[in-house]
Structure formats: structure tokens, C-alpha cells
Amino acid sequence: MNFIKMLAVLCALAIVPAQARAQAEKKTEPADLRSLSNAQLEQRKIELTSQLKAVRAQLTGLKADAEQSDLKIQRMIASAKTPAMKDRGRMLLARNRLSIIRDALQIYYCDKPDKVPSSLADLVPSYLDEVPELDIPGYKKTGNVTVLKKANGAGISNFVANKGGWLYMADPAWGQSERVFMDARVMFEGKALFQY
């Protein structure tokens, strides 16, 4: 794997652990990488590979924590005494499931930095057991994923059909770090769900 691509992956990760960020800030790349000797390039490649493995391990831990939270939120919803409490729990569950998918995507990028999955189904079963369902108040419960092939310079709000499922931006040219969104305009804690 090209060490420059590995560096790009580290920089592009939406969740860069504090350790990796601190290390990256201490080291600066020379203005011209072509000036490095083969031994220096190989050493830099080894360092970047090690950092990438550390990032992957931390992302895996974050994903596991989010999966545990998912179970706790489900229990909270089941024991909720009022419809309002159940709805709030369902909103929290939706946001948590978004985090799980995003963490799985980041782990995928650690493993395959040169590739963008064509759909969320590409994450199953190696990174996700299944694409989680969304059960947003006011929407039908669904695990539907709308795959967006081309962004054409548009922001995600232009693609929100308000159907309550997932939106996945498969365009490799998409200029944002996040690729998964909720297809919902309903507000939660001051933001429309698609903005999370």
C-alpha cells in the first residue's frame, strides 16, 4: 500500500484518536517527499502502518461501545412508561445506530483505504452483522438504504426524501468525511436528523 495513501486515510478519518492526532502534530512531512531516501520512506511507511493499526483498534473499540449502548437504549425503550419517553429513546437509538454504521465505515477505510463501498451491504458481515433498522417516530420502521451514486456538488439536504431510512453517498468524489445519513427531516435536539 502506498504510504501517501495511508497518510491520507489517517488524515481523512472522521474520528482520529487523540494519541494519533498528537503524534501527527509532532511530526511534519517534508515539503517534498521525493527528497527522502528509500530507507526513510520505508521507515515512514512502517510508522504510518502502525498508526493506522492503532486507529483501527480504537475505532473497533468505539464501535463495540456503541453496540453495547444500542442494547441499553433498546431496554430503556422497552421499559419506558410514556409514549414521549419511548419516542425519545427511539431517536437516541437512531442516532446511536448512525454512529455504529459510521464506525464500521471508518474501520473499512482502515482496511481498504483505496476503496469506497458501493453500498452499506458491502459492510456485512465483516464490519456489521447487518445494516441496522431505523425506527424513527413518525416514520415506518425500515432498514432501507438509498444509495446515492453521484453528488454532483450538491449537499446532502438535496437528497433527503424524508422516508425514514438511510442515505449512503457512494460517490468517491464526495468531499465530506461522512457518507451515511438518516433520510429524515424531523428535528431532534435542535437539528434535523439528516444533519447528524
Image (spheres, grey):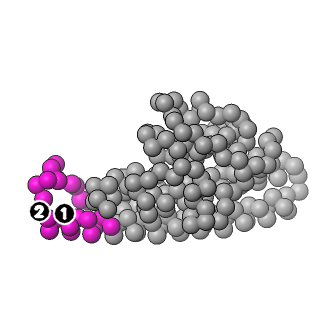
SS state under label 2: loop
Q: Is residue 39 magenta?
A: yes
Residue depicted at 14% across the width and 68% down the height: 39
Around disc 1, counting alpha carbons within 10 Å, would you say few (fewer than 14), some (14 to 19), or many (20 or more)? some
Q: Is residue 43 magenta?
A: yes
Depicted 9 relative to depicted 190: above or below: below
User: Left or right of 179: which side holds 185?
Assistant: right
Around disc 2, counting alpha carbons within 10 Å, would you say few (fewer than 14), some (14 to 19), or many (20 or more)? few
Q: Which mark is residue 191?
A: none
> Residue 73 at what x, y percent from top left?
74, 61
Quarter of the image with the C terminus is top right
| Residue 36 showing in the rendered view | yes
Depicted 42 relative to depicted 165: above or below: below
| Residue 91 showing in the rendered view | no
User: Left or right of 5: which side holds 175?
Assistant: right
| Amino acid on which disc 2 is placed | Ser
Residue depicted at 51% across the width and 36% down the height: 150
Location of mark 2 (residue):
37
Q: Nearer the viewer, residue 115 or 16?
A: 115
Residue depicted at 12% across the width and 59% down the height: 36
> Residue 49 at what x, y percent from top left?
33, 67
Location of mark 1 (residue):
41
Query: Decide: marks 1, 2 in contact (CB < 8 A)?
Result: yes
Residue depicted at 27% across the width and 69% down the height: 46
SS state under label 1: helix
> Residue 67 at what x, y percent from top left?
64, 65
Span shown in magenta: 25-49
